[in-house]
Image (spheres, rainbow, N blue to C red):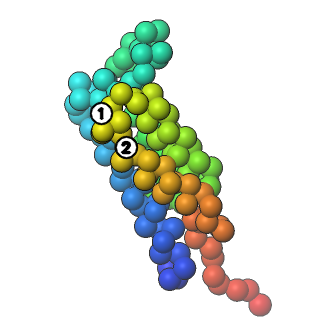
Amino acid sequence: MKITRDQVPQLLLRAGLAVIFLYAAISSFANPQDWVGYLPPLLTDHVDSDTVLHIFSVYEVFLAVCLLLGLYIRYVAVLCAATLAGIVFSNFSLFQITFRDIALIFSALALAATPDGGAQKNTTQSS
């Protein structure tokens, strides 16, 4: 399938967001002690923090795979934005670190707002 110039911005947004979610997921599996502090106490007060972190990491891998494969892009982009917003708001005391996520939120919303949701279209025509 040939990629058109119009598809490049959506592909870049998808790839960029996928890398962010994949990195966070892989890093949290490899070094959970670096990530467990970002979990909201509302969750960790009731469920083991390692369990929450592993479930969240699987969710992040799911988002990344959907972005890379072009599956349900509009919905996944909205989930990405909501996830990042949740991270920012639940860690507001760490805003000096999480403020960067605001740009990622808007990137995910931009992807969701694209006319085709970032999905690649089949440009072959049948007669």
- Quarter location, residue 98: top left
| Horizontal and vertical percent position of residue 114 | 61, 66
* Residue that numbered label 2 is attached to: 99
Q: Is residue 54 visible?
A: no
Q: Nearer the viewer, residue 80 or 102?
A: 102
| Horizontal and vertical percent position of residue 19 | 36, 53
Q: Is residue 41 visible?
A: yes
Q: Nearer the viewer, residue 1 or 106?
A: 106
CA distance separating discs 2 and 1: 20 Å
Looking at this view, name the residue that lies furthest to the right. 127
- Quarter location, residue 36: top left
- SS at badge 2: loop
Quadrant of image for the C terminus: bottom right
Looking at this view, name the residue that lies furthest to the top. 46
Instruction: Give the number of the disc on residue 28.
Output: 1
- Between disc 2 and disc 1, the foreground one is 2
Q: Residues within 10 Å of mark 2 (few under 14, many from 20)?
A: few
| Horizontal and vertical percent position of residue 4 | 52, 82
| Horizontal and vertical percent position of residue 58 | 43, 35
Residue 105's place in the image compared with 16, above or below, is above
Instruction: Say if mark 2 contacts mark 1, CB within 8 Å.
Output: no
The residue that appears at 40% across and 30% down in the rendered structure is: 92
- Quarter location, residue 122: bottom right
Which amino acid does the dot numbered 1 rest on?
Ser
Residue 89's place in the image compared with 107, above or below, is above
Residue 4's place in the image compared with 49, above or below, is below
Instruction: Give the number of the disc on residue 90.
Output: none
The residue that appears at 29% across and 33% down in the rendered structure is: 28
Which amino acid does the dot numbered 2 rest on?
Phe
Q: Residues within 10 Å of mark 1 (few under 14, many from 20)?
A: some
Pointer 2 or 1: first along the chain? 1
